[in-house]
Every structure is written in structure tokens, then in C-alpha cells.
Amino acid sequence: MSEPNPYRSDEYEWGPGQQPGTPGQPAYGYPHTPAYQPTLPAGVPVPPQHAPVPGPVGTGAPLLSLGDITVVGDQIITPAGPMPLKGAVWNAMDMSRTEEKMPTVAIVLAVVFFIFCLLGLLFLLMKEKTTTGFIQVTVTSGGKHHSTMIPARGPDTINWVMGQLNYARSLSM
């Protein structure tokens, strides 16, 4: 592999030829850039130095997020557009329900163990709780209104949402 190509001819070179111009000058369309990237003493490339770009007012870390409603700085960001945080009205409505039923496993175990002893009837005391539904959170501010639905994962979801809502109300004062 270190030997020269025996099939190479000097009359034709495949690919682009030498750009017209003087050596050391950039050719048309190519800016002159140094052939090396400056490094720190440890060999780490120096990051490019740019002036910080100021963002819109109110950007930063989110203070609160409920569904697709986010409180950032002094405004509320929603898909309906930004709203002022000052004077916002927050509401929540619990549209979830928790059902309690006897699982099928309890009935099967009660029948199986009833044959062996009467203690199998204790399996009929097993209960299973399932929570379904949503919690609707609405915010109104600056002439705009937005509503979001938060799925209820358990019976304590409403307590978590109301805690977040009370925090949002305290920020709105």
C-alpha cells in the first residue's frame, strides 16, 4: 500500500483541478480559515466566543407545570399563547372516580380453598381499587382562557393537583 500507483498517468487527474488564483489566497466561495483550531494547554478545544443573546422577558426555569400549562418567570405559557401571571384565576374540577371491586382471583381462590377448608371464604374479603378519569385545570388571565386535563393515576392525584394549584395561586397575587 505504500508503493506508488503503477497505473497513474501524468496527463489526466480525476477530480477538481487547482483553483485559479495565487497560492495562499482563498478561492472563490471559500473563506480563509486557519488550518488549525486553537487549543487549551490540556488539548481541549477552545469553545467559540459569542456574545450572549438575550432571550424574551420571563424565560428561565419553569416554576410550575400542570399538564400543558407552564409558569415561567412572570408569565403563564400555554398553547393558547402567553398570559400574564399577575391576576390569573386558577380553577380545578375533579372528574375522576375510584371504584372498588372484588378481583376475579379472589373468587377463584375462595372456590378452590372452600373445598379444603372454610378459610377459603376469607379470600372474598379482597378488594381492588381502580381510579379512572381526569382532573380539569383552567387558567384565565389577560383576556385569555386555557383548560387542560390531567389523568388521575390514583385517589391522591387530586391532592397533588390542588397543592400545585395553590402554589400557582400564590404566585399570581
Image (spheres, rainbow, N blue to C red):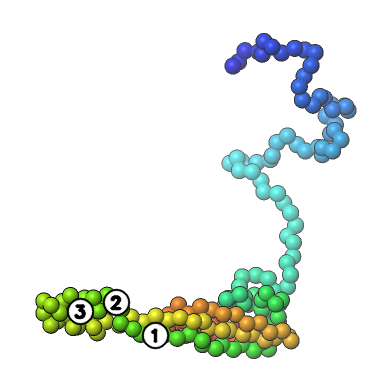
> Residue reaching furthest top?
6
The residue type indicated by label 3 comes to: Ala
Of label 2 and label 1, which has the lower sequence position?
1
Residue labelled with disc 2: 104
Q: Position of residue 58 (x, y in %)?
A: 69, 74
Looking at the image, which residue is at 70% across and 49% down?
48
Q: State the image coordinates of residue 167 (x, y, percent, origin top left).
A: 56, 84
Secondary structure beneath label 2? helix
> Considering the numbered disc 1 on the image, is that residue within a helix, a strand or a loop?
strand
Residue placed under numbered mark 3 in the picture: 110
Residue at 82% of width from left, 25% of height from top? 18
The residue closer to the viewer here, 2 or 124, is 124
Residue receiving disc 1: 99
Q: CA distance from mark 1 to mark 3?
A: 22 Å
In the picture, which quadrant includes the C terminus?
A: bottom right
Image side of residue 48 versus residue 103, left or right: right
Dot 1 or dot 3: first in sequence order is 1
Residue 6 found in image quarter: top right
Q: CA distance from mark 2 to mark 1?
A: 15 Å
Judged by depth in the image, the label closer to the viewer, 2 or 1, is: 2
Looking at the rendered structure, the kind of residue marked 1 is Glu
| Residue sitting nearer the eye, 108 or 61 | 108
